[in-house]
Structure formats: structure tokens, C-alpha cells
Image (cartoon, coloured by chain):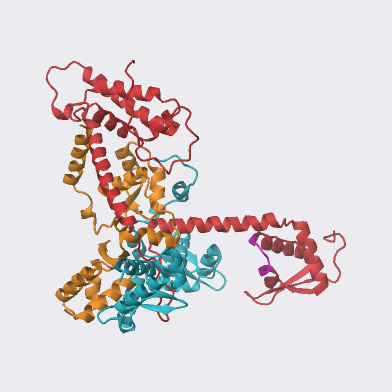
Chain colours: A cyan, B orange, C red
Amino acid sequence: MNDGLKATLEALIFVSQDPLSLERMTALLEGVPEEDIRAALEELVRGHAAEGRGIHIVRSGGGWLFATKPAFDRDVRRLLQIERKNKLTSASLETLAAIAYHQPVTQSEVSAIRGVDSTYTLKTLLEKKLIKIVGRKKAPGSPLVYRTSEQFLLYLGLNSLDELPSEEEMSRILQEERAADG
Amino acid sequence: MNDGLKATLEALIFVSQDPLSLERMTALLEGVPEEDIRAALEELVRGHAAEGRGIHIVRSGGGWLFATKPAFDRDVRRLLQIERKNKLTSASLETLAAIAYHQPVTQSEVSAIRGVDSTYTLKTLLEKKLIKIVGRKKAPGSPLVYRTSEQFLLYLGLNSLDELPSEEEMSRILQEERAADG
Amino acid sequence: MTESPDLPPEPVEPRSDAAPSPAPADGYQVRLEIFEGPLDLLLFLIRKKKIDIHDIPIAAITRHYLEYLDRKEQINLDREAEFLFVAALLIYIKSQMLLPRETDLAEQDDPRRILVDRLLEYQKIKAACSLLREKEEDQLLQWRRHFLPPLAGQGDLDVVELSLFDLAESFFLMMKRRAADATRVIRGRDVTIEAKMKELVGLLGERRMIDFLEYFAAHGSLEEALISFFCVLELVKSRVAVAVQDELFQTIRVWLRKDPPRTVAHE
């Protein structure tokens, strides 16, 4: 058996986002007979199916791809749960930014700034304690008023809100023109 | 050797979005002695390092993760249709090194070290998420303060800033250069 | 100045993030570009002349440095200022060295010290760079997976880490986007008060009564909506229309008066 071919296939299946088909493998490995590819693939799949392996190669949508074995589903989900906890979605980030720069603000003001209803992300941010309710606005419907929390400053290593980057600083940083390099 | 434990670790490392640290493994696998985890991990890593394997488990960014072996770079690029991976420009790398060794630093400190205005390269590095803004300096103008990111460690395959080239390694390089000059 | 300055050895690392420059007319520009900056050039000269960095003959190095700059005809002006700054520093140090002194200088009083410290630090960074470059090359050959492998019933895992930069960037990009949206609508449709007034009166005549909030919400842009609000006020003020709000926070109903004064708003 061609060990190099088996290893190549393993690397290719690993990085491929879509199931890797036999045709695709054959096209990529020009000059290698399909026979050989088929044999190497079969051995690779068999090797991973063995006891003591946590990931296997499964056939799906006309190709092959790596997946964790069902036996470890509970552990896998627990891990993903933990990893998720520390991160913010881009919707949350945008909402947080709108609040940080416009506080104190109401839900409808945040939604207007973003152009998207932000009720749900506000709830998420409240749960994560990145924002807090500071009262109600004297306006029709007396909507709740939000501000960023102490935690928010701690999270970003800021001493006060005055330390948020200003528009000028950001546009200087984001500015595209200067091709000349530093 | 505990085959089940090895398989579990393989599944977890495979699925993790970040390098999986030993602490996280221990936390996930409650009740399993760290000793055992360490031993299983070692065997797992050794198994993948063997000939005939296309992917291996590397230690980077403070944890373990799967990556393809260097030998298959060409095949992978062909599959992903990527001409070549861009290296950092020497200006960017120099700026990154200046930040890595002097962090936390401001833009003007970096520029002083390099003797060259570094505003533009800082922006590039921020966009690549190799550095991050961590706050402001208590100094006139309250300039923004930069640090290298987690991404930076991963990009260079380091596990912590302690793994940056040491003074000895740097002076060895300088000696070699001098010797090459004859 | 007769001695021609040394030029660096063969192409080192071309600077690929610089703007693509036109084919060099005289080749000098390209060569200067090789140096990341004035410190890089100084280190190059020190190495080339086999000078002890701790005991730099300032007069000689200043001469080499200036000669080198002199030959450059088309250097980038931004960069030129930085090269000239170091030239000024060299000349200043040279003048300090020439001052008559009664005793030998203590090491910390050596006028060269400020330059030497910077050069040593920069040299260290350069050395680190060549080691880091090896690590980079090594890493670039190994491919990681950047997608989550299939899982049964997984939720949304589109995740972003919070950093000050992300936060501020997200905000200002959002504001830019909103500003662009607003301008697009206004540009696309030129709303004048007259046109809006006509539209409103026409609509009122046709439907007899409109629900103002509904009408207001149907507008493409805030600006257009505000103009129509202004028009309603104008129509009410000039007694062409009547607006009634039954209760606070409820919708406003607007209808035409049966006997509008002839002077207003029909044209």
C-alpha cells in the first residue's frame, strides 16, 4: 500500500470544507490511477474506523469528510458550549458599539442606529452583563434606558468611556489611501 | 493505555475552534486524572506524527490543534485553489517584532524603535488581527496602546510570549551574519 | 565626496506592500527601498565598513550616510524626512564630539550613546525578525481547518472575539453604512416640499382620510418622512386639512376640510 498516497488523501479530506469526491481526488492527483486512490481511500477509512480513534471519515453527499464519532457527541457538545460562552456574535458586537458610543440610549434608538430590530441582542448583552438598565426615558411609552456596564470597561481594559477610540482615530487607522508604508 | 481516553481527546481537539489547552481538557473530562490525560495526549500526538499520516497534532497558541503536515502543502493549495500563502512584508514583520518585544506600546514608541512612521503597518496588523488595542496610555494625548493577540501566537506557532526568540538566539544570528560577511 | 557609497548586496526582501512603483528610471529608488528606514541603512553601513557598533567613528559614518542619501534622486518624500532626521542627528553628535573637554568622557556622557542604544535595539529586532520569519514559513506550510465540522443540530456558531478595535470598527463602519444608505435615498429621489404637498393633497382627496403613522412609516428615508410630517403641519396650519389624535400615542388621522381656503396648496 502506498503510504504517501494515503497520507495525502487524509490531508485533503481534512481541509476540504465540502465532502471530497473520488472524481475530485482523481483530478487533483493527476497521473495517479483511480484504482490506487480507491484502494488507499478504503484503507484510510478502515484505519479511522478502528477502536481507539475519535474521528472517522464518513461518506456524505457524494464524497468523504471527517467527523467526530457519535460516541463522543456529549463531550464535543460540552466543549463547543464552553467555547461559545466567551465570544460575541457580530450582531451583539454592533449593538454593543451602538450603545457604547450613544449612551444613554433606548431600545428603539439602538434599533434605529443599526437599522435592525435589536431587542434580542440587547437581552443577550444584559445577560452577559455588558450593559445595564439605568432608568426610563421621559418620552412616550417611557422606554428603558441602557448604558454599558463597569464590566464592559474592565473587559476592554479602559478606565472610562472617554478612552474609547474617537471617530478621527478610527478613520485614521482605517484609512485606505496611504500606500506608502511605515 | 486508555484507548477510550485517547479517542475522546482526538475528537475534542479535532472539533475545537481554538487550540485546546490541557486545562480545558481536564475541565471537560471531570474526574479523569491530569496524569492520564497527559499520557493519552502524548500517545495520540506520537501516533499522528508517524509516517503515513497526513495530519498531525501540533502545539500552538497554548493548546493542541490539528493541522496538515508540511509535505502536503502543494496538494492542499491545489485543492483550495490558493496560489501561495502571503508572507508578512518585512515592514509588517518588523513592526510586529517591535510590538512583541516591547508591549504594551503606543504607535509613536513603535515608530521610534524602527526609526520610521509605523501608522500604516499598525493598521495592517490590526486588520489581520495579529495585534489588538488594549486601552490608552496615561500620557499627553492618551495614545492607544497595542499588544500582540492570541492570533499572533498561532500565526507563528508559539504557545506564549516566552517562546519568542531569546537574547542568546538573537546574538547567535548576529554572529552568524558577521561571520558570513567574512 | 569622491568615494562612491556602497550599495547593498543583491535584492533582499522586496517590499510587496508598497504601492507598485513604475519601472525605476535609474535603479537608485529601488535600492533605497530595500532599507526599511534610516536605522536599517546605518546598520548596513556599520556592517559593511566593519565598524564596532560601540565605538562608531561618527565623522566617517556621517560622511558615508550623507553620500548615500546624496545619490538618491527620487526617494519617497515621507521617507526622506526620516532619513534626513537621522542625518541631522549624526551631524549633531559629530558637533558634540568636537567640543573640547578637560577629561575623558564617562561612558554615559558619550554623545553617541543615544544613537548606539537605538541601533542596538533595532539590531535585536532585525535579528528576531529573521528567526520569526523561519517560524512563519514553517507555519504557512501547515493548514488548519477554519470551519466547524458537521454536527447534528448545531446552532449558530458565528463568533467574534471582543476587542476595542473590533468594537470601534464595527461602530464606525455601521455609521458609514447608514450614512451611505441615507444619501442614496435622497439622491435617488429628490423630495421637495412642493412635490410632497401635492402628493399629500392628492392622496387626501382620493382617500378622504389617511392614517398618518402608516403613511409616515411607508417612506423610504427619514428625511422624506420628516418632509411629509412638515407638510401635514403646514396643511393643518393653513386650514386645508384637519388632523386629529384621539389619544396620546395613538395614530393621527388626517383629512381635508370640506371648504378649504382657495388660496393655499392647490398649486
Q: Position of residue C151 (x, y in %)?
A: 40, 78
- Quadrant hosting residue C101: top left
At a point 64% along the width and 76% down the height, the residue shown is: C250
Residue closer to the observer: C169 or C19:
C19
Q: Position of residue B15 (x, y in %)?
A: 34, 73
In the rendered image, which quarter contains the C terminus of chain B? top left
- The relative height of residue A110 versus residue C29 in the rendered view (above or below) is below
Taking the view exactly as shown, the residue that stands out farthest to the bottom is: A71
Q: Position of residue B152 (x, y in %)?
A: 32, 55
Is residue A26 visible in the rendered image? The answer is: yes
Residue closer to the observer: B71 or C88:
B71
Q: Is residue A59 left or right of C222 when viewed as pictured?
A: left
Is residue C256 visible in the rendered image? The answer is: no
At a point 40% along the width and 51% down the height, the residue shown is: B86
Residue closer to the observer: C94 or A32:
A32
Q: Is residue C220 left or right of A131 when viewed as pictured?
A: right
Q: Which residues are magenta?
A: C216-222
At a point 26% along the width and 57% down the height, the residue shown is: B158
- The relative height of residue C128 versus residue B2 in the rendered view (above or below) is above
Q: Is residue C235 left or right of A81 when viewed as pictured?
A: right
Q: How many marks?
A: 0
- The relative height of residue B28 versus residue C27 in the rendered view (above or below) is below
- Quadrant hosting residue B20: bottom left
In the rendered image, which quarter contains the N terminus of chain B? bottom left
Residue closer to the observer: C236 or A108:
A108
At a point 74% along the width and 56% down the height, the residue shown is: C192
